[in-house]
């Protein structure tokens, strides 16, 4: 394209040269992002339970027992989130590195197949730095941005599910205000 062309690349084109292993890793990483994202809102639900226990007269022994039980529950849910978040991040990052490496090879092969006249109009000493910058951007956008987007969307969906199951009336009122928030 022209200099300054900012159209970008279609999402599916990043994954055009993926191997079967990469596609399986993407599926596992995506599942990990969804599971981790769905579990995040449950921490707020659990913490809400502990806040309710502090109201009114409370037996100190019962309170200690409740806090210990809730603490173990938070630790368990947090461990689940950690494991699945690690899976999604590690798998997506690995695939992003593979994509970047494949694209570097294709680009270099294409560059080496150019006629000598092609290089007369460019600063050859800048090619390695430009390649490093371009492929670092590709790697970070595929490995971090897409995975984080999936995680964030699943967290939002999980938050909505928790809201509808725990406080339907309040959740419906907030959904009614969504168009106003988007405007």
Image (spheres, grey):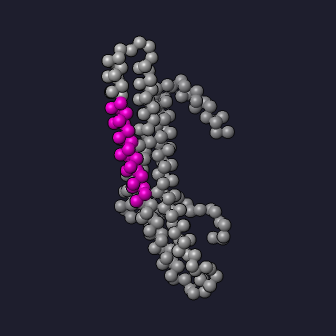
**In the drawing, does residue 183 fall left or right of residue 42?**
right
Q: Residue at x 60, y 86 (%)?
A: 117
**Quadrant, the C terminus:** top right
Q: Residue at x 35, y 46 (%)?
A: 83
Q: Residue at x 33, y 27 (%)?
A: 68
Residue 183 vs residue 83, the one in the foreground: 83
**Quadrant, the N terminus:** bottom right
Q: Check the image and name the residue furthest to the bottom.
A: 116
Say if 91 sits above or below 71 in the image: below
Please say whether residue 76 is one of the residues in the magenta stretch: yes
Q: Which residues are magenta?
A: 71-94
Residue 135 seen in this snapshot: yes
Q: Residue at x 47, y 51 (%)?
A: 147
Q: Position of residue 5 (x, y in %)?
A: 65, 66
Q: Position of residue 118 (x, y in %)?
A: 60, 83
**In the drawing, does residue 73 fall left or right of residue 183?**
left
Residue 13 seen in this snapshot: no
Q: Position of residue 32 (x, y in %)?
A: 39, 47
Say if 35 sits above or below 60 in the image: below
**In the drawing, does residue 110 fall left or right of residue 181?**
left
Q: Quadrant of residue 76?
A: top left
Residue 45 vs residue 132, the one in the foreground: 132
Please say whether residue 86 is one of the residues in the magenta stretch: yes
Counting the numbered discs, the total is 0
Q: Position of residue 21 (x, y in %)?
A: 35, 61
Is most of the magenta stretch helix, strand or loop?
helix
Q: Check the image and name the residue furthest to the front.
A: 60
């Amino acid at each position: 394209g022209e200099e300054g062309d900012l159209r970008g690349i279609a999402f599916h084109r990043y994954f055009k040269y993926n191997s079967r292993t990469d596609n399986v890793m993407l599926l596992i990483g995506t599942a990990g992002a969804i599971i981790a994202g769905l579990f995040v809102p449950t921490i707020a639900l659990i913490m809400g339970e502990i806040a309710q226990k502090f109201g009114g007269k409370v037996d100190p022994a019962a309170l200690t027992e409740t806090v210990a039980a809730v603490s173990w529950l938070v630790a368990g849910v947090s461990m689940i989130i950690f494991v699945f978040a690690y899976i999604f991040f590690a798998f997506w990052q690995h695939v992003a590195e593979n994509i970047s490496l494949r694209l570097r090879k294709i680009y270099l092969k294409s560059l080496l197949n150019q006629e000598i006249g092609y290089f007369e109009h460019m600063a050859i000493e800048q090619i390695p730095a430009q390649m490093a910058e371009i492929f670092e951007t590709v790697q970070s956008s595929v490995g971090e941005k897409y995975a984080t987007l999936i995680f964030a969307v699943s967290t939002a969906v999980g938050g909505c599910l928790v809201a509808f199951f725990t406080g339907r009336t309040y959740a419906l009122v907030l959904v009614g205000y969504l168009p106003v928030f988007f405007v």
